[in-house]
Each structure stands twice: as structure tokens, then as C-alpha cells.
């Protein structure tokens, strides 16, 4: 679950909030075929966990299927990933990013951060071969927000 307004206040009308609840499944299972069947359960869980006060507080609900969002790891994935990235690295105009591009299971904010870091490097004129090393640099120097509650970050 994430709160899109934490990334951009424009992700909900003024005075409102928004939540994105991800439910994983396989492409051929009942959840994929009929995701709407889970909405009552998801809403009940949001209330049960105190994420929202009441189901009636929900102004709108949208269900969207997004295929191949999470990588499925095999025991040999690291060797296969290394080989694939090396081979794809021969293309001078190709950058691989995010969950499916880097086979990196992460939070979406990390993928966004990775994209921002890569875009910044491209805009500064860095060679694409060096930009591809931006895997996790976005968070490297970020302060630990929980460490200092008075921190402005």
C-alpha cells in the first residue's frame, strides 16, 4: 500500500487523500480474472487495520490490472540477470530501470527515485553507460527520517 499524495499533493483533490493498495496474483488466477471480487475484503482490511476510519469515507474506488509488475525469482536469477544486463549493455541508447527493467523487487518510490537519478544524469550529459549504474544511488545519501523526528526531511 502507498499514499500517492505523499509523492505529489496533486494526486487527490484538495483536502482529500488517496491510497494505492496492491494485490499480487498470477495472470491466470481468480484474482486476475475478477479483481473487483476483492474490493470489499480490501476495504474491510483498511478499516480493520486503522488505515481508514470507515468504509463510507471512500469517495471513489478504481481497480486496475497491471501485468508483470513483480519479478519472479528463480535460484539462478542473479547469474541470468548479470548475463542479460551485460548483453543489453551493448546497446548504447538503452537504459534498464525499475522492477521489471532491473529485476529489482523494491517499493515503487525506489523505482521513481531510480528514474529521477537516471534522468538527472542524462540531462547532465553523462554517457549512458555510466547512467546505468544509478540502481540505488537516489537513496544513498538520503537522511534517515526516523532517526531525527525534528528533521525537515
Image (spheres, helix red, strand yellow):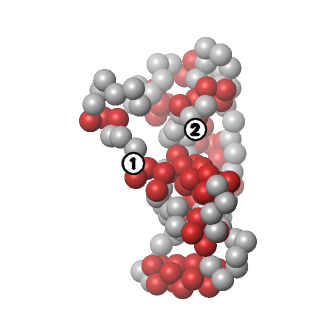
Of all residues, the one furthest to the left in this rendering is 147
Percent position (x, y) of residue 74?
A: 47, 78
In percent of the image, x 52 and y 46: which residue is there? 109
Compared with 75, 11 (above or below) is: above
Location of mark 1 (residue):
141
Percent position (x, y) of residue 122?
A: 66, 58
> Left or right of 142: which side holds 32?
right
Which residue is at the front of the view, 59 or 129?
Answer: 129
- Residue 29 appears in view: no
Which residue is at the front of the view, 20 or 54?
Answer: 20
In front: mark 2 or mark 1? 1
Location of mark 2 (residue):
20
> Left or right of 83: which side holds 150?
left
In percent of the image, x 61 and y 26: which residue is there? 9
Q: Which of the 4 image quarters holds residue 86?
A: bottom right
* Number of residues whose C-alpha sits closer than 10 Å to that of mark 1, classed few (under 14), some (14–19) or many (20 or more): few
Of all residues, the one furthest to the top in this rendering is 15
Compared with 132, 49 (above or below) is: above
> Left or right of 47: which side holds 15?
right
In percent of the image, x 58 and y 23: which residue is there? 17
Task: Say what secondary structure mark 1 lies in.
Answer: loop
In which quadrant is the C terminus drawn? top left
Percent position (x, y) of residue 106?
A: 48, 56
**N-term-proximal mark, 2 vs 1:** 2
Q: Which of the 4 image quarters holds residue 36?
A: top right
- Residue 131 appears in view: yes
Residue 14 circle label: none
Amino acid at each position: 500500500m502507498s499514499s500517492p499524495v505523499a509523492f505529489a499533493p496533486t494526486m487527490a483533490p484538495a483536502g482529500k487523500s488517496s491510497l494505492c493498495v496492491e494485490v499480487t496474483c498470477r495472470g491466470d488466477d481468480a484474482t486476475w480474472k475478477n479483481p473487483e471480487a476483492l474490493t470489499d475484503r480490501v476495504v474491510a482490511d483498511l478499516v480493520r487495520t486503522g488505515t481508514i476510519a470507515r468504509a463510507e469515507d471512500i469517495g471513489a474506488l478504481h481497480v486496475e490490472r497491471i501485468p508483470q509488475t513483480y519479478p519472479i525469482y528463480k535460484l539462478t536469477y542473479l547469474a541470468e540477470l548479470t548475463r542479460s544486463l551485460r548483453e543489453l549493455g551493448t546497446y548504447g541508447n538503452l537504459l534498464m530501470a525499475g522492477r521489471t527493467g532491473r529485476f529489482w523487487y523494491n517499493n515503487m518510490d525506489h523505482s521513481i527515485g531510480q528514474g529521477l537519478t537516471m534522468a538527472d544524469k542524462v540531462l547532465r550529459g553523462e554517457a549512458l553507460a555510466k547512467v546505468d549504474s544509478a540502481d540505488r544511488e537516489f537513496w544513498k545519501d538520503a537522511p534517515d527520517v526516523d532517526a531525527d523526528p525534528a528533521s525537515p526531511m
